[in-house]
Every structure is written in structure tokens, then in C-alpha cells.
Image (cartoon, grey):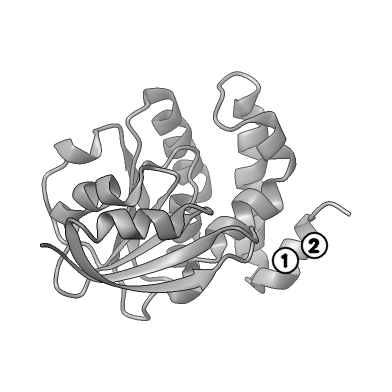
């Protein structure tokens, strides 16, 4: 049986209001994907597991007092829009979504506007954004860890936490990154992919 909306509702245990936001996001993605290649049709068929659950699973690892988030390489909003939905439900926090592809940024802004999410989307490249410390940095399928850390470093402060969704190459990427970077890492098995994981990175600094 394919993973369904009902499965997602049960596993995530989010409110009815937040579930409605996920459904609206899904509907907009279906509509826009007919004209713009936001995600592959195969991945879209598995939206509730591959995208919704995959993105949502970050939220339980967000600190209670986190206020400002930045999502690097947001694409169609995974996981940045899910973080914004979490902030909306909590009534606290805001997300900056970074996506250099203009059409994708337009899509993100449409979702943000229609769902009244506490978020902004920019088409600047990550390396062009004015450095500022964020509480939480997220990314999925944006870059290998050594390069991702370079992109994230200008936004990293003493208490910053990086929450990065990674696939089966995660351990290899961690090994490569450790040649240039010092960091603490907690590896959490993925809820959506048996070969994947969530990397919780703290105390990132160059060697």
C-alpha cells in the first residue's frame, strides 16, 4: 500500500489546521508542477512519505526557544515550508527560504502568501546573502556536507543547530567534512527512508 495522507496524519500527529496547510501545499505543488518542473512526477506520487514526512521529521528536533530559521536550497519548500508551518502552529519563529531558481522562488512565495506562513523566500544565492546568525539551519539535497558547511558557516553562531537530511552517503560525507571542519554530530535514523538519516550538527567551526 502506498504511503497516504492518513498515514502522514497519524505519524506526524499535527493539528487539523497544520494538516490543512500540508494539503494546500500539496494541491499547489500539483497545480504548478504541470507547468514548472518543481519535483519529478515519481516523487510527487509519493508526496506524503518522500516530501511531507521527510520534511516534518525535522520539527521534533527543533529547540523550544528557536526563533529564526534559514533553509538553504529550498527547491519546492522541502523542508523550509514545513518548518514555517511548524512556526505558524507554534505562534513563534520565522523562516528564510533560499532558492536561486527564480521560478521556484515564485512558487515558494505563492505558498507563503496563500497559507499565511511566517516566512520569506529569496532568489539570492546562499553565498550572496548578508551574514547573520540563525538559531536553526536546514537543508535537504542541497550540497555534500563539506560544501554545505561552507555555505552554512556565515549563518552559524554559538548556539546554532544544523538539521540536515541526508541519504546513504551521509557517513562518507561526514568523514570528508571532518578533514576541514570540527563539529558535534547526532545521527538520527530517517522516518521516511531506511537508507537515510537526519544529521543534527552543533559547534561547527573550521579546523
Residue 138 in sight in this render: no
Q: Residue at x 52, y 63 (%)?
A: 197
Residue 207 in sight in this render: yes
Q: Secondary structure at mark 2?
A: helix
Q: Residue at x 76, y 56 (%)?
A: 5
Residue 44 at x, y = what percent?
A: 68, 38
Q: Quadrant of the N terminus?
A: bottom right
Q: Which one is in front, 52 or 107?
A: 52
**Residue 76 has which mark?**
none
Q: Residue at x 69, y 54 (%)?
A: 49
Q: Are marks 1 and 2 in contact (CB under 8 Å)?
A: yes
Residue 183 located left or right of residue 107: left
Q: Quadrant of the C terminus?
A: bottom left
The count of marks equals 2
Q: Which one is in front, 182 or 125?
A: 182
Residue 55 at x, y = what percent?
A: 54, 57
Per the image, the residue denoted by label 1 is 9
Q: Which one is in front, 118 or 159?
A: 159
Q: Which one is in front, 159 or 173?
A: 173
Per the image, the residue denoted by label 2 is 6
Amino acid at each position: 500500500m502506498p504511503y497516504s495522507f492518513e498515514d502522514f496524519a497519524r505519524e506526524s500527529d499535527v493539528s487539523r489546521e497544520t494538516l490543512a496547510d500540508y494539503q494546500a501545499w500539496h494541491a499547489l505543488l500539483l497545480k504548478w508542477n504541470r507547468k514548472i518542473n518543481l519535483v519529478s512526477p515519481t516523487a510527487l506520487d509519493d508526496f506524503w512519505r518522500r516530501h511531507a514526512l521527510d520534511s516534518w521529521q525535522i520539527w521534533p528536533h527543533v529547540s523550544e526557544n528557536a526563533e529564526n530559521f534559514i533553509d538553504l536550497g529550498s527547491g519546492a519548500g522541502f523542508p523550509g515550508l514545513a518548518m514555517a508551518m511548524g512556526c505558524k502552529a507554534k505562534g513563534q519563529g520565522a523562516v528564510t527560504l533560499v532558492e536561486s531558481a527564480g521560478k521556484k522562488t515564485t512558487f515558494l512565495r505563492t505558498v507563503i502568501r496563500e497559507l499565511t506562513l511566517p516566512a520569506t523566500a529569496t532568489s539570492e544565492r546562499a553565498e550572496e546573502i548578508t551574514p547573520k546568525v540563525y538559531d536553526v539551519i536546514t537543508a535537504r539535497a542541497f550540497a555534500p556536507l563539506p560544501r554545505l558547511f561552507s555555505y552554512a558557516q556565515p549563518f552559524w553562531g554559538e548556539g546554532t543547530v544544523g538539521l540536515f537530511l541526508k541519504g546513504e552517503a551521509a557517513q562518507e560525507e561526514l568523514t570528508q567534512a571532518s578533514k576541514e571542519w570540527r563539529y558535534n554530530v547526532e545521527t538520527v535514523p530517517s522516518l521516511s527512508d531506511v537508507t537515510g538519516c537526519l544529521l543534527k550538527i552543533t559547534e561547527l567551526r573550521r579546523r
